[in-house]
Amino acid sequence: MLSALDLSDNNLSGNIPSSLGDCTSLSFLSLKGNSFQGIVPSSLTSMRGVEILDLSHNNLSGQIPQFMERFSFVYVNLSFNDFEGEVPVLGVFANASAFSVMGNSRLCGGLAELGLPKCKKTEKHQKEFPLSIIFIIIAFTIFSILCLVYVWYKKRKGPSSQSLRDEQFMKVSYGELLKATNGFSEANLIGEGGFGSVYKGVLDDTIVAVKVLHLQNRGAHKSFIAECEAWRNIRHRNLLKIITSCSSLDFQGNDFKALIFEFMPNGSLHDWLHSSSSTSRLNLLQRIKILLDVASALDYLHNHCLPTIVHCDLKPSNILLDDDLVAHIGDFGLARFLGTNSDQNSTSGIRGTIGFAPPEYGVGSEMTSSGDVYSFGILLLEVMTGKRPTDNIFNEGLSLHKFADMALPDHVIDVIDDDLLNLLQEEVIATQCTEAKAKKIEECVASTMKIGVSCSMDSPPQRMNIENVVRDLQHILDMLQNM
């Protein structure tokens, strides 16, 4: 039942396992950046639900499998391998923007946009040309008969697998949501933003979060469309899981739109950092894990989605925590799709949240993945210092970025969150840790703060790459766990 598998950029070698064909529910498969060789196994014909396939940057050879023409791909990347022969022109290969075969020097034919040489026909083939035509006619006739039999069989058997997949999404009405949230009562209200209110509810004995759009607010309708489009294209363990949506009328005949999500029992990161009612405190290890979760999700959105998705409103209140304090990014109401016309569907004129939006957005620059990195840097510094970027102390040229930067590298303990400092001191006393271990802990704090400062530079080119952020945070986490 695996729906997505990403093994990219490892050191895997050998042939692609034929057993992958058993993963009939896969919709996303990436094996790029490895050392796989040989041909693409024919067993992959079973994976008819795959929408995105990336086999680029390997050592695969042979011809491009003809079965790929029959799949309903959204995008296929076969670039930088050693494929040979003619490029197909049917299915996904009929749209030059939906596939890539660059870096395969022995390919020919295909669409004119590819600029590949024409395939040469040998004299033997030219002599057998009439025979090949007869063969094609016979094969086409047999194929047509099989198609008719298949359609007849499917009609007798019932709905298609695609229809079954669609039916897996719960269908809910306005009345069901009204009942699930006890009439959208104040007691069930768990969050509120510019475009919507979030309520806790119960649907079919399952606790859910229901985001009801404030359609009277300007931009709310576009926000709903942008969020639906984003959730339709993404799957990651550190992104909030959407259950379904509702677009209907309320009992007064007014438009009603809502999104239904998996409920996160531990609330938002903002609540853990700033709520006076919270009796629990996040220790250093938990904070680093949460930051790594968020960075991993951003890396997925920026580097492993087609097209690239920019969140545009990263902040602690949009980071939700499950039972195990695993972080999930939510609220894609301002999301943008880079390099497509889809980004025009998202809200215009809104540039994120004050304090977290990068300075270039304030002068009208386009939203970019670098802007998300800036927001992540500010979020990281808030997690480590416990101070909001809009705190009253940040005036007359002092910002959260400068506040942290001035403490590096030797005075970070003076600026970290009081709760975090108390926990560290309690740990030092309880474990009677050595001076060397205490020094390593301080170095981990300083290294983490340095990442936040590097990500929140005013100049976009000076900001860290999110892939390097993931790598460095993982290194810090490994150090802490091995102490």
Image (cartoon, rainbow, N blue to C red):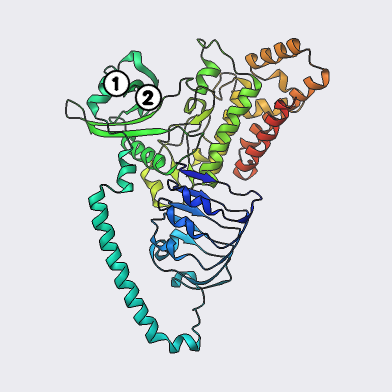
Residue located at (51% from left, 50% from top): 20
Q: Is residue 398 above or below residue 168?
A: above
Q: Is 373 on the left or on the right of 259, as rendered?
A: right
What residue did someone put label 1 on? 180
Residue under numbered circle 2: 208
Residue 111 seen from this side: yes
Amino acid residing under circle 2: Val
Amino acid type at image mark 1: Ala
Q: Specify which label sits upstream in the sequence, 2 or 1.
A: 1
Q: Are marks 2 and 1 in contact (CB under 8 Å)?
A: yes
Residue 374 in the image: state x and y as whole percent: 57, 36
Instruction: Tell me which corner region of the image, top left, top right, bottom left or bottom right, holds residue 184.
Output: top left
Q: Name the foreground residue: 434 vs 359.
A: 434
Q: Position of residue 196 (x, y in %)?
A: 35, 27
The label on residue 457 is none
Q: Residues within 10 Å of mark 2 (few under 14, many from 20)?
A: many
